[in-house]
Image (spheres, grey):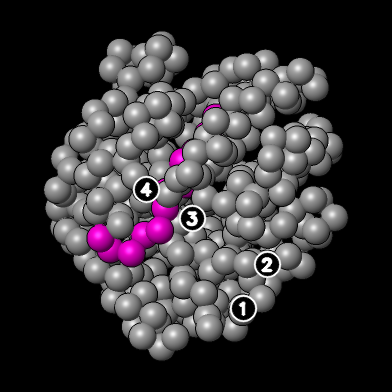
Amino acid sequence: MMKKIKPLAFYLPQYHPVPENDEWWGKGFTEWTNVGKAQPLFEGHEQPIYPGDLGYYDLRVPEVREQQAQMAKDYGVHGFIYYHYWFGNGKQLLERVANDVLKSGKPDFPFCFCWANETWSGIWHGLSEKILAQQVYPNEQDLIAHFEYLLPFFKDERYIKVDNKPLLIIYDPNHLNDGDPHYISRFRELAKENGFDGLYVMASNKLRDDLDFKSMGYDSKISNAFQKAWVPHIDKKEYISHSQYYKNRIKGLIGIKKKEQPKVRIQDAQAVVNDLKFEESNVPTYPCILPNWDNTPRSGYRGIILANNSPEIFEQQVEKAATYLEDKKDYPEQFLIVKSWNEWAEGNILEPDRKYGFGYLNALKKILNKHSRNE
């Protein structure tokens, strides 16, 4: 019998103030700051976007976390992937939400971590030169301290495990490999010393699928198929023919060409989804789907927009992912990765917004129900 499809949604904890963000971006900064100040950059650009049922929430409030988990559960999401920020030398950011979830035992909802092992710079917010928090892998002591911080989470019955191995997602496998190639194998040893059968380590969707993840020490990876389908569409928008370039230059030199408005890179969601094709790497490869994308609230004209999104187009993605998983009977679990539950400043959300309400969640539930009947 086929295993049940288990959607896991990336979950951003940056919806409460922290001293570092106060210092970098101004007192009281949260992800909502970018969402609220967004401007339409062209005619018909739908910005700002507005949250639906949950409003502009603060994740320090336990009731909010309960509501999110209940909503996710009601529509078939199996668990959340909390972003986890450990920069080395004991430095963490945005750990409050996970710590509260652990301490309180609520919500009663599965979760795991994605270690977002990358340096924070101001590049997406117009401070490109400024390093805010550097990702480093200093020494064995720090590695052990990192594991000891994670251990109580791993031991929690809500923490997602595969065959008695806690699931840990690594955002940037190359960065970790360059920084400390033995990090994962040491983590596995420590997990075994603490009563687990090891760790189930998954590479994120950041890297292409055709790399040798097995020899890098990974058990699985999140498919990069969506980016692969998307990139050719992004590139098409950036090229300008030589003849057009020189015409523009001549017009500029003789003063008849108006200063051009900067243009945002826009692609059609349906065209990208039509090209979406999930393929295996040399480890089990779990499909990853994106309901929507518009990161101009963070990045302005440097942003990228996936236009004409709709719950119906998302439904087509869920169908492709579920169909792909049907052939993967040898996978230990049928994970379906959703990016993301609540990345509002990237316009990348499964949570209800004011325009579509529960449309995206309904699309997910509809296809999950269809495939569970087929089992």
Residue 157 drawn above or below residue 77: above
Q: Residues within 10 Å of mark 4 (few under 14, many from 20)?
A: many
Q: Secondary structure at mark 1?
A: loop
First in sequence: mark 1 or mark 4? 4
Q: Quadrant of residue 39?
A: top left
Percent across and percent down for residue 284 are: 68, 67
Disc 4 or 2, which lies upstream in sequence? Answer: 4
In this figure, which residue is indicated by the disc labeled 2? 284
Q: How far apart, in angstroms, are the residues tagged by discs 3 and 4?
A: 57 Å
Q: Which mark is residue 328?
A: 1
SS state under label 3: helix
Per the model, the C-alpha gap separating discs 1 and 4 is 26 Å
> What distance separates the C-alpha of mark 3 from that of mark 1?
52 Å
The segment highlighted magenta reads: 74-85
Residue 80 higher or lower than 98, as above or below: below
Q: Residues within 10 Å of mark 2 (few under 14, many from 20)?
A: many
Callout 2–callout 1 Cβ contact below 8 Å: yes
Q: Which residue is mark 3?
A: 248
Q: Amino acid at mark 3?
A: Asn
Left of 26 or right of it: where is 153?
A: right
Q: Which mark is residue 109?
A: 4
N-terminal of the pair, mark 2 or mark 1, is: 2
- Disc 1 and disc 4 in contact, CB within 8 angstroms: no
Q: Nearer the viewer, mark 3 or mark 4?
A: 4
Of the two numbered discs 3 and 4 on the same chain, state the one appearing first in sequence.
4
> Disc 1 marks which amino acid?
Lys
- Quadrant of the rendered image containing residue 171: top right
Foreground disc of the pair 1, 4? 4
Q: Are the residues flagged by discs 3 and 4 in contact, CB closer than 8 Å?
A: no
Q: Residues within 10 Å of mark 1 (few under 14, many from 20)?
A: some
